[in-house]
Amino acid sequence: MREGVLDLSRMKTAATSLSQFRLTTEDWVRVGLGLLVLGLVFYAYMVQKVNSYEMTAYEWLYGHWKRISHYSHGPLIPLIAVGLAVWKREEVGRARWQGSRWGLGILLFASFLYYAGVKAEQERAVVISFVLMLYGLVLALAGRELLRSLFFPISFLFLMIPLNFLEERVAVPLRHIVAYVSTVILNGLGIEAMKVGTGIHSSVFRFDVANPCSGIQSLMALTTVTAAYAYVTQQSQWKRWVLFLSALPLAVLGNFVRVVGIALIAQNYGTETAMKIHDSVAGFIVFAVALGTMVLIGWCLSLNYRRIWSNWTKPTPAGEPKHE
């Protein structure tokens, strides 16, 4: 009898909850428009051809992920973005839905960018318009509060867009920097080495700091990992930006370790042994060093320095318990 009363009570509670969740005519119109727009977005980016090679925007994007090694992590970025949105589910659930007309303006601009990108065969512009389209959809259908909660997960999708045109502008200067600093470190360790262009020459070995050793490859993956790690672990925006912007020096640091380590192995065990290690495990070592340093920086940013300073300058009197 007791169980029957409890079941009846639960049914009444569920019925009350359902009655409170009634959708108004305006809500149904908004849902219908949302589904229609999502269908159009799917067609525009997954079906419609956007260049003379008869490729859709997704096919072009996936082709870059597959061909360019430092964007091989590209397919993971949408999954991470969804994971970040799920991680914010409580904040998303508390958001008040109130559509904004500003979203329509963003949608119009994204549509114009898509049209211009297709006509000019600028596939990156087409993909960028997709991210802008998501901003507009959320703002137009749900409002500012939900957009505020989903702003970073949506913005995270920008990291999936290949920027391989930066190789010539970024990779070459990085190669020179890595070669110069590595030469200074090797000479400091007692190994006579000389920088020749982007190469490092000694009496035993001659290496060229190629694009993989410049840090450009690890930089792309590291910015992705660092952005997600900073967003999840840091509460202050300035700490998130510090951690995110550390990706470039961390990538370069990891490649200093790679170049100097390979040079030391070549000096002691020969160039052939050094190149085997370079081709097999050096890349993993570089990324491990960079990730370890990233975690260390995040830990340092998370410390309460005010409390540490207070505990250090005002030691606990003898006999009193310490407050952690």
Image (tube, helix red, strand yellow):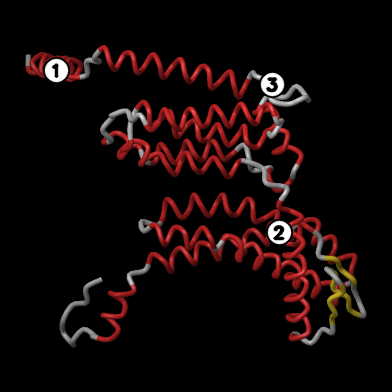
Amino acid carrying label 1: it is Thr
Describe the element under mark 2 as helix, strand or loop: helix
Q: Which residue is drawn at 42% across and 62% down?
A: 239
43, above or below 280, in the image? above
Question: Disc 1 vs disc 3: which is toward the camera?
Answer: 3
Q: Residue at x 51, y 32 (%)?
A: 109
Q: Position of residue 181 (x, y in %)?
A: 73, 76
Q: Distance between the residues labelled 2 and 3?
A: 31 Å
Q: Earlier in the sequence, mark 1 or mark 3?
A: 1
Q: Are marks 2 and 3 in contact (CB under 8 Å)?
A: no
Residue to which mark 3 is pinned: 49
Foreground of the two, 223 or 57: 57
Q: Where is residue 265 in the image (x, y as percent from the top left)?
A: 81, 72
Q: Residue at x 44, y 58 (%)?
A: 240
Q: Where is residue 229 in the image (x, y as percent from the top left)?
A: 48, 53
Q: Quadrant of residue 281?
A: bottom right
Q: Quadrant of residue 106?
A: top left
Describe the element under mark 3 as helix, strand or loop: loop
Foreground of the two, 255 or 249: 249
Q: Residues within 10 Å of mark 2 (few under 14, many from 20)?
A: some
Foreground of the two, 128 or 254: 128
Residue to which mark 1 is pinned: 16
| Picture quarter with the N terminus | top left
Q: Distance between the residues labelled 1 and 3?
A: 49 Å
| Picture quarter with the C terminus | bottom left
Q: Quadrant of residue 175?
A: bottom right
Amino acid carrying label 3: it is Lys
Residue to which mark 2 is pinned: 170
Amino acid carrying label 2: it is Val
Describe the element under mark 1 as helix, strand or loop: helix
Q: Residues within 10 Å of mark 1 (few under 14, many from 20)?
A: few
Q: Which of marks 2 and 1 is nearer the N terminus?
A: 1
